[in-house]
Each structure stands twice: as C-alpha cells, then as structure tokens.
Image (cartoon, rainbow, N blue to C red):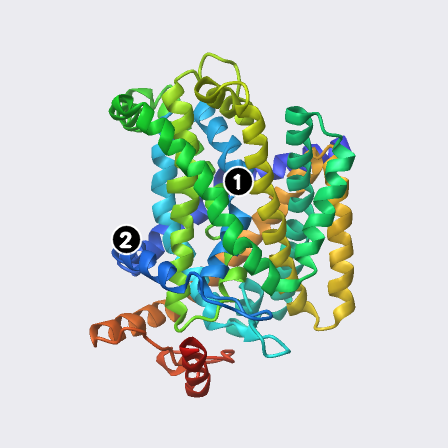
Amino acid sequence: MESLNNLVSTINGFLWSSVIIALLVGAGFYFTVRTRGVQIRYFGRMFKLIAHTAGRKTEGNEVSPFQAFCVSTASRVGVGNIAGIAIAIVTGGPGAIFWMWFIAVIGSATGFVESTLAQIYKVPREDGNGFRGGPAYYLKNGLGHGIWAAVFAILISVTYGMIYNSVQSNTISLALNHALGLDRMMVGGVVTVLAMLVICGGMGRIARVTEWMVPVMAGIYIVVALGIMVYNITEMPHVIYVILRDAFDWQAVFGGGMGAAVLTGFKRGLFSNEAGEGSVPNAAATADATHPVVQGLIQAFGVYVDTLFICSASAFIVLLTGDYASTGLTGIELIQWDLAQYFGDWAPKAVSFLIFLFAFTSLIGNYYYGEINIGHLTHKKWPLNLFRVLIAVMIFWGSIADLPLVWNLADLFMAFMVLTNVTAILLLFPQARACLMDYEKQLKKGIKVPLFHKDALPDTKGIVWWDEENNSNHMKRMEK
C-alpha cells in the first residue's frame, strides 16, 4: 500500500507541478483574450444577474440560476479556503496571495466558457422537471466522444461523490473531536444521517438547502474577517504593500523566493476555484436560465466569491496577525491561533463550527455532481440508489479513517478530469464565443432579457434544447 501511495504521489507531483498548471493558466489566458476579458467587462452584470434570480421559487427538481450558483459554491468552497490559504502564506510568503488573485481573474474566463457550454448542451431530465449537463454531456453531444464522456462521468462520480466526501467527513470528525472532544464515530454517524436526509431528496432539495446555507456560511466568515480588517484598519495599507512587494520581489528570483510565491499562488488559486476542472459545469447545466451566457456569467462570479472573497478573508486574518513565520503553525491550526488572538480561547470552537458548515455543504454539493453523471451513464433507478448507499458508507468510513492514499488518488483522478475537460472546452470554444456574441448583440438592441436559440451557433449538432417553444415555456414560468 505504501509503494502504491508513493507511485501515485510521484505522478501527481509531475502533473500538478507543471502539466496541469501550464494547461489551466494557458487556457485562462486564451479565453480571456478571445472573449475580450468577459469576466472583467461584465463584472457588474454578474451582480445583477445573481440578485435577479435569488429567491425565485422552484418546485421538484427545478433549479434556478442562483440555486445552481449556490450548489457549485457549496462544493468548491471548503476547508481548503481556510487551511489552504494559511499553508500558502507559510510556504510561498505574502506574495502568493497576489498571484492567487491574478489566477482567479484569469480562471474566471475559463469558468465562464465551461459553464456556458454546459448550458448549451444540457438535456431535460426524464420527468421533464429540470436539467442535466456538464462535461460528460458536451463531450458526447458536442464532440461525439461517447467513450471519453463515460470515462469522465465515472471519474467525477468516484472522485467527488465518494473520495472527496470521505475526506470532508474526515475533516468534520477531526475538527469536532479536537475542539469539543466528540467521539469521531458518533460524529460520523450524525453527519451521515444529516447528509442522506438532504441527498435522498434529490437535486431539488440539495439546491434549496444550499440556497440558504451557502450565503450564511460565507457571510459569517467574511464578516469576521471584515471585523478584523476594520479593527486593524491602520495596518491594512502595510499588509497590501507587503503582498505586492513580495509578489514582485525580483531580487528573490534566483533565490527561489518570487518563484515560490508565484507557484504557490497559482496552485492555491487553481485548486480552490476549480475553474477548468469540469466540476462546476455540472451544476451550471441544471439551471433554468434564459440564455447560456447568463449562467456562464453567474458561475464566473463564483470564482471571485471563492478566491477574491473567502480565500482573501483567510489571508487577511493571517497577515494582520503577522505571526505566520514565528509560531511554527500552519493550516487550520494557524487560523485558530490567529482568531484566538482577537476573540479569545473560544475561537477554536467557533472555527470548528465553520469547518462543519464548509465541509457539510461540500458533502452535498459533491454528491450533486455524482447524481448528474450517474444520470448520464444510465437512467435506471437502482444504480443511483446504490450510489447513495456507497456515499453513506464513504461518509461514515471517512470520519474514522486515515486518508493519505485516498487524497492522492483523488488528486490523480482530478488531473485526468482537467486534461479531459480543458481539451474539450478548447475544441468547443467557438460555440461559447458565438453564444457570447449573440448575447451581446441582443443587449445592444436594448433587449433586457436576451433569449437564446440554437441557430445562433455555427454548429447545432447535439443541442437538444434552446428552440422557440422552449424559450416561450421558460418565459411563462418566469412570469408566474
């Protein structure tokens, strides 16, 4: 087992230190240039679109654009947004934060493209209530690669639905055991039951739970960070200066300082916001949007929420305390220590509560991706029910297990997902670009709610939605 773990670690080291980073950064630059910086030009419109769709009532498995945004945010915003940032600062210095911000802006363009494509190639559920879609669907319907679509569906179902969920439950049990002394097996049992109550309600229930849970979770953490920033307002200019100074410390190039900051910032940003990994499009496709670009913009904003808001909150908590280089701590322990300096000894317990929220929402968001891809592989009910049983087993097992090999296998599977997904969206980019041009053309005509028809694209092969009848039915639902 140890030799297998070492082999997987070696392969991961090669892929994630060079190949994957080069691919994701290169794709992000390409999409940014070819869309004329869509993620920057329409930043204000992203806010409006999210606000417009928030609170829209849905029934059954119907999912609103805001709910799809919350589901994807639930999955991508996890413990890594807290612990991972502390590790990044200790490893790469404050300059890593600037490069994390930089890669978030670049990655947002990738997020826009993959989510727009997911909307273009989405398919209605068998019961006619809601949609499914994602990389497996545009691989098969858009590119005609049925085998690669099936491989991707299996990889993401195993990686997110089972492996990552065991990791999340492990994090919850460890945090509550250390902070409150709770038995890990008991915690595992409670978390498994709570997760299954949400999961077995299907995509609609998951969307409605995350719709209120994600804003509360993110809001609490950001408010705490803002409070610390206001309390140390006179130190903020110096912290910003240190971040920029270390990010462009050219004298450290030959000593590895700047290189470490860039590489660490890139890795942390890419791992955290998931742009290009092929996970978020699965949620994006389920939204009942008026135009594919609407959901593309909303999901692109999710990259900003993850990295510019939540990861930055962790960064400022660490940097304003200023003891990241002297305590000998890193990860979640450093965040707990820093918060204790402001709020006293009860801070570690409060952090354990936040960890529970972050990890639990990831549990149900990760399952959501699995259900969508099980639906791609088969429409029979028993495989989905078996998948739910396996999810329950993995959640409980993860709460009491030691997971180094599981983590490494998840990273390896994720690397294969990135390679497959980014290749697909690069090939299908002309479709996404044509879709964006159609949206912008309608806006210039003064149309407040642009509607999409598949004839606006250069290739309509594999598109089963987006015609006049479906647009008309959508507008009727919006008016109710």
Q: Within the image, what quadrant is residue 378 found in?
A: bottom right
Left or right of 299? Residue 394 is right
The local crowd at label 2, few if under 14, some if 14 to 19, many if 20 or more residues have their Cα within 10 Å, is: some
Circle 2 SS class = helix
Query: In the image, what residue occupies the spot 35% across and 79% down?
Result: 456
Query: In the image, what residue occupies the spot 61% across and 45% down?
Result: 360
Amino acid type shown at disc 1:
Trp
Which residue position is annotated with label 1? Answer: 16
Circle 1 SS class = helix
Which is more N-terminal, label 2 or label 1?
1
Left or right of 243? Residue 216 is right
What's the distance in space between the residues labelled 1 and 2, CA to CA?
27 Å
Is residue 96 among what the camera can see? no
Left or right of 459? Residue 354 is right
Query: In the image, what residue occupies the spot 55% across and 75% down?
Result: 123
Q: Position of residue 326 (x, y in %)?
A: 46, 12
Q: Which mark is residue 42?
A: none
| Image quadrant containing the N terminus | top right
In this picture, is 210 found above or below 15? below
Q: Position of residue 262 (x, y in %)?
A: 38, 32
The local crowd at label 1, few if under 14, some if 14 to 19, many if 20 or more residues have their Cα within 10 Å, is: some
Query: In the image, what residue occupies the spot 48% across and 39% down?
Result: 18
Which residue position is annotated with label 2? Answer: 40
Amino acid type shown at disc 2:
Ile
| Image quadrant containing the C terminus | bottom left
Query: Toward the viewer: 390 or 59?
Result: 59
